[in-house]
Image (cartoon, rainbow, N blue to C red):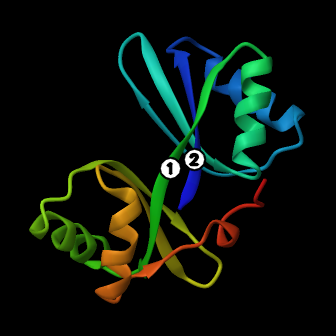
Amino acid sequence: MILQLSVFMQNERGRMADACRTIAEAGIDIHALFVADTEQFGVLRALCDTPATAAERMQQAGWRATVTPVIGVRVDDVPGGLAALLTFLDERDVNVEYGYCVSLEDGSAVNILKTDGDKALEAVLAEAGFAIARPEEIYDID
């Protein structure tokens, strides 16, 4: 299971820079970043080193931050790689709440997914031949 840093913030000029600066000042490296927003608020989602420590540091600095479990599935970085994964999940009635991709140095892509069945789903995906990404492939662990 991969742990993602989730930070709730107001959708105001400079807030994303402030959040990233807080993480940087804690000496924590961000490897992937995704922001979902509405007119007034946003959620910054990041794969970063030591995610539990990052959430703690963000909270100490006054941010609403949590650690969210997500799954990472390696796919070939070719047209249709993500579609095959999502079709597999859809055929099993797995709801994907959100997702984003991270490219790795070896040329593969890791699809980060928040679903309604993360823990059991990893085993199902592995049994079907999908490669599950390990946290240490993406970030330094707490």
Q: Which residue is label 1 attached to? A: 69
Look at the numbered disc 2 and give the secondary structure of its residue: strand
Q: Eyeballing the image, is 80 above or below 136?
A: below
Q: Eyeballing the image, is 27 above or below 11?
A: below
- Identify the residue shown where x is 53% and y is 73%: 133
Q: Is residue 34 left or right of residue 139?
A: left
Q: CA distance from mark 1 to mark 2?
A: 6 Å
- Identify the residue shown where x is 59% and y is 44%: 46
Where in the figure is residue 141, as x and y percent of width and height? 76, 59
- Identify the residue shown where x is 52% and y is 12%: 10
Residue type highlighted by circle 1: Pro
Residue type highlighted by circle 2: Gln
Q: Nearer the viewer, residue 29 or 142?
A: 142
Which numbered disc flags the more N-terminal residue, 1 or 2? Answer: 2
Q: Which residue is label 2 attached to? A: 4
Question: Which of the labelled discs sits on residue 40, or is there none?
Answer: none
Local crowd at mark 2 within 10 Å, few (<14), some, or many (≥20)?
Answer: many
Where in the figure is residue 76, as x and y percent of width and height? 41, 84
Label pair 1/2, CB-CB below 8 angstroms: yes
Q: Nearer the viewer, mark 1 or mark 2?
A: 1
